[in-house]
Amino acid sequence: MASKRQQQGQGSLETLIGQDSLIRGEIISKGVVRLDGSLEGSIQADYLILGKTGSVKGDMSAREIVVDGTVEGDLTAEELVEINPDGAVEGNIRTAKLIVTEGAFFSGTSFMERPRKVEKPEEENLETAEPSEETAEPVEEKKKLKRIFIF
């Protein structure tokens, strides 16, 4: 599943926590994190993958979270939480989109939130703007001024 998402622009795997690892504390990463070991604490990343052998006793927070292991704690994702057939979550989930695949286990409450809308800068809304008395430029000339944002 991760390779398919990586091909769609999620980025490459930046942090891998192996199956024989036990971490106690807090993990914060701005990239993609795959956890196949055990974590007693919280984890925050851009994209989280919890492998089949992975377990978390604590909270998880990311833009997207994919669960194949076990979680005892709350999950917060801006866009998506996906619990696959081998995944088990005991805790609350707050996300815009929740996928619980057949065979998965989920015990808790889910809170669905609308995805955040990115507001357009004023420069992109100029086509609806009326020319002011202070500027002698017609609206057509202002349309040429556009910013391109690449995320």
Image (cartoon, rainbow, N blue to C red):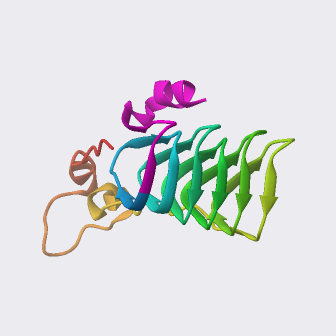
Instruction: Name the outermost residue toward the bottom.
Output: 133
Question: Residue visible at 13% across and 74% down?
Answer: 134
Q: How many marks?
A: 0
Give the answer, above or below, for where 22 lies relative to 133: above
**Residue 15: within the magenta?**
yes
**Considering depth in this image, is 10 or 119 the residue closer to the camera?**
10
**Considering depth in this image, is 143 or 139 the residue closer to the camera?**
143
Give the answer, above or below, for where 68 lies relative to 118: above
State left or right for residue 51 relative to residue 46.
Answer: right
Question: Residue visible at 50% across and 55% down?
Answer: 39
- Residue 4, picture quadrant: top right
**Residue 61: within the magenta?**
no
Task: Provide residue 94's location: percent of width, then percent of height.
Answer: 63, 67
State left or right for residue 114 relative to residue 47.
Answer: right
Quarter of the picture holding the C terminus: top left
Q: Which span is picked out in magenta?
A: 1-23
Task: Provide residue 32's location: percent of width, then percent of height.
Answer: 41, 41
State left or right for residue 58 relative to residue 87.
Answer: left
Quarter of the picture holding the N terminus: top right
Task: Provide residue 82's location: percent of width, then percent of height.
Answer: 67, 47
Task: Provide residue 108's location: percent of width, then percent of height.
Answer: 77, 69
State left or right for residue 29 relative to residue 21.
Answer: left
Question: Residue visible at 39% across and 33% down?
Answer: 11
